Amino acid sequence: MGWMGWIWDLNGPLWVVLMGLCLIAIVMGVVLMIRSGHGDPGAAASTDRSHQPEPGGPKSSSSTASEAIRMLDERYARGDITRDEYVQALEDISVSARRALS
């Protein structure tokens, strides 16, 4: 049979190791998909409501600015944006709000 038969035989140690690694990779992939929200198609839609219109019609400029600041605060808290980007966006929001009020 030789050494090749010992390695590639379905009961050989290399097959056991390869099958174990494949099983571990599959389990890790499933766990990562579930933790990131890709395993549940409704997870993203149920948590992200920023694209849905508010009941009662359009918002006023002050409530729009408040919502924008709240979203900006969340992005800064998550680390999605730097401090400089945060400060610049705050200035942009305040300028836009002042223009809308005048």
Image (tube, grey):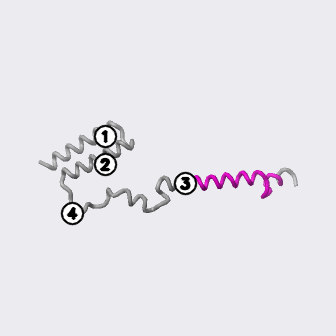
Query: In this figure, which residue is indicated by the disc labeled 4?
Result: 56
In-image side of 19 versus 27 (left or right): right
- Given the image, on which type of amino acid does mark 1 rest? Tyr
The structure residue drawn at horizontal position 19% and vertical position 43%, both measured from the top left corner, is 95
In this rendering, the label closer to the viewer, 4 or 1: 4
Q: Which mark is residue 71?
A: 2
Q: Where is residue 61 drawn, in percent x and y?
A: 18, 52
Q: Residue 64's mark?
A: none
**Mark 2 residue element:** helix
CA–CA distance between discs 4 and 2?
Answer: 21 Å
Say whether disc 4 or disc 1 marks the residue closer to the N-terminus: 4
Q: Which label was assigned to residue 86?
A: 1
Q: Badge 1 local density, few (<14 within 10 Å), some, or many (20+)?
A: some
Q: Which residue is mark 3?
A: 31
First-in-chain label (4 vs 2): 4
Query: Between tags 1 and 3, which lies in front?
Result: 3
Earlier-in-chain disc, 2 versus 1: 2
> What is the magenta range?
5-28
Residue 90 figure quarter: top left
| Image x and y of residue 52, in percent | 30, 61
Q: Position of residue 69 (x, y in %)?
A: 27, 46
Q: Amino acid at mark 4?
A: Gly
